[in-house]
Image (cartoon, rainbow, N blue to C red):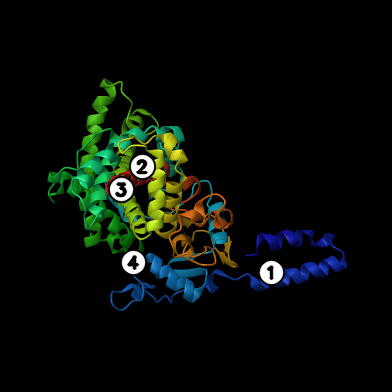
Amino acid sequence: MRSKLYNNIMRRIHHCNKSTLFQVLRFLSTETKFVKTFDEIPGPKSLPLVGTLYQYLPMFGKYKFDRLHHNGLMKLRQYGPVVREDIVPGVSIVWIFKPEDIEMLYRKEGRYPERRSHLALQKYRLSKPEVYNTGGLLPTNGKDWWRLRKAFQKHLSKVQCIKGYVDSTNTVVEEFIDRRIKRKGRTNDFGPELSRLFLELTYYVAFDERLQWFKDAEWDSDSECSKLIKAAHDINSAILKTDNGPQLWRKFNTPMYKSIIKGHEHIEKIALKVMSEKLTSIKTTDSKASLLEQYLSSGETDYKDVIGMTVDTLLAGIDTATYSCCFGLYHLSSNPDVQEKMFCEARALLPHNNTPVTSGMLERAVYSKAIIKEMFRMNPISVGVGRILPEECMFSGYRVPAGTVVVTQNQVSCRQEKYFRRPDEFLPERWLKGSVDYESVSPYLVLPFGHGPRTCIARRLSEQFLQVVLIKCFRLSGTLR
C-alpha cells in the first residue's frame, strides 16, 4: 500500500516543470527506498505453534514475563528502536522506543483508543452478566468504554474535586505516621506498611469509611485487611502472565486463572457489601457524598457498572500506589542530598509537625513534585502503554498495519543517555524550571499514567496521595533525627 505522502505527490506531479519533476522523482525513489514493510521489522524468531514462548521458558529462555523492562532493553540493543514479536502465534506485538514514535502512536490512537489487556479479568466478569455489564474500564474498548469513562471521570478529573480530598488524606497519613512509624520505629520491609496506608486512603476517599487497618490485629494473615491486600496482589500478578503467556485459560481454568477468580470473588464480596450499605445512606444523609455515592446517584451508569468500578478502585488503590511509593522512598534513602532538600521543603511548608497539609501547600511544593516525576521516570507503574492501531502507522520507517498491538517502552527509553543526562542517577532537579533538561526532554517519555483520552482516570488523586505522604513523612523525619 502506498504511503499518503507518495499519493499526495503523485496527484501534483502533472503541475511540475521538468526540473521540479526530476527532483520529485529523485525524492520519491529515496522515500520508497527507506520505507520498510511490516515483515521487515526485526525481532525474536517466532516458531510455528509456539511463537516466541520458548524464549520465555524458565532456565532456558533469555526473557522473563515478570521482567518486561529487562526484556525490552535486550531487544532494543539487539534489534533497534522498533521490534516485532509474536509471543503467541498469529498475534504480533510491536515494541517502540523512540519518543517520536510514541508521539505518533498517541496521535493516531483515535477517538476511542483500544488496548489489549486484562483479558482474563474480562473473561471472568463477562461470565457473570448478573453482576457486571462489561469487563470494566481496563479491558473494555469502543463505545462501551467511552460510556463508562465519560461517567466516571467527572468526579476524578476535575482539579477542584481532587483538592477536596486533601483533608481526609492528611488525616489518614497523620494516623499512619503516629501508629506505624512513631510507635513501631524502624522496620526492614516498609512495603506491607504502605499497602495498608494506601488501602485505608483509597477506602476513605472512595467510600467515606475508615477501616482502622493500622491496628496490630490487622497484621494477622486472617484479618480482613491482609486478605484484601493478598487478593489484589494475586490478581495483579496473574494479569501480566495471562495477558502475555499461553492463552490456555481461555479454554481451561488454569492455576493462574483460578488465582484471578479466587482473588476477584473476595474483592467482589467486599464491593457488594459496601455498595449495599451506600444505597441506604444516599437516602438518609446530607453530608458530602463519597465517590461511590456520586457514582450510584449520577444516573449515567447503573448498579452493575458501579460494581466493576468499585472493584477496579480497590485493585488499583492497593498495589500500584504502594509500588510507586516504595521505589520513591528507596531512591530517597539512597540520595542524602535529595533527602535534605525534601526535608527543607517540608519544614518550610509545615512550621510544626502537626500542621495539616493544604491544597495551597501542594501547589507550592515544587521539589516534592519533581521527586515524584523523577520517581516515575526511573520506575514507572508499567513499562509503557499498549494500543491497537485503528489505522496504518509509520514507526521509524516501518509500516505497521491497522489492528496491530503496539506497546511503548517508556521505562527503557527513560534510562537512555541519548534522552536524559546521567540517566541512571536520581536527579529531581532535572524537573525544576530553569534546568537543562526541563525544556529539552520530550513530553512523551515520562508518561506513567498514559496520555490522551485513555490516561489513568485517577492520576491526579494518586499524585496527591504521594505528595502528602512525602511531605508529612519528611516533616516527621526532622524530629526523629
25 displayed left or right of 237: right
Counting residues from the N terminus, which is met first, the one under dot 3 or under dot 1? 1
Under circle 4, the secondary element is loop
**Mark carried by residue 477:** 3
Counting residues from the N terminus, which is met first, the one under dot 3 or under dot 2? 2
The location of residue 303, given as percent across then percent down, is 31, 34
Q: Which residue is mark 1?
A: 31
Counting residues from the N terminus, which is met first, the one under dot 1 or under dot 4? 1
- Give the label, 1 or 4, closer to the camera: 4
- Give the label, 3 or 4, closer to the camera: 3
State whether residue 205 appears in this view.
no
Q: Which residue is mark 4?
A: 65
Is there a contact, CB below 8 Å, between mark 3 and mark 2? Answer: no
Disc 3 residue crowd, few under 14, some 14–19, many 20+, Cα 10 Å: some
Q: Which residue is mark 2?
A: 468
Q: Nearer the viewer, residue 157 or 453?
A: 157
> Which kind of residue does numbered mark 2 sit on?
Val
Disc 1 residue crowd, few under 14, some 14–19, many 20+, Cα 10 Å: some
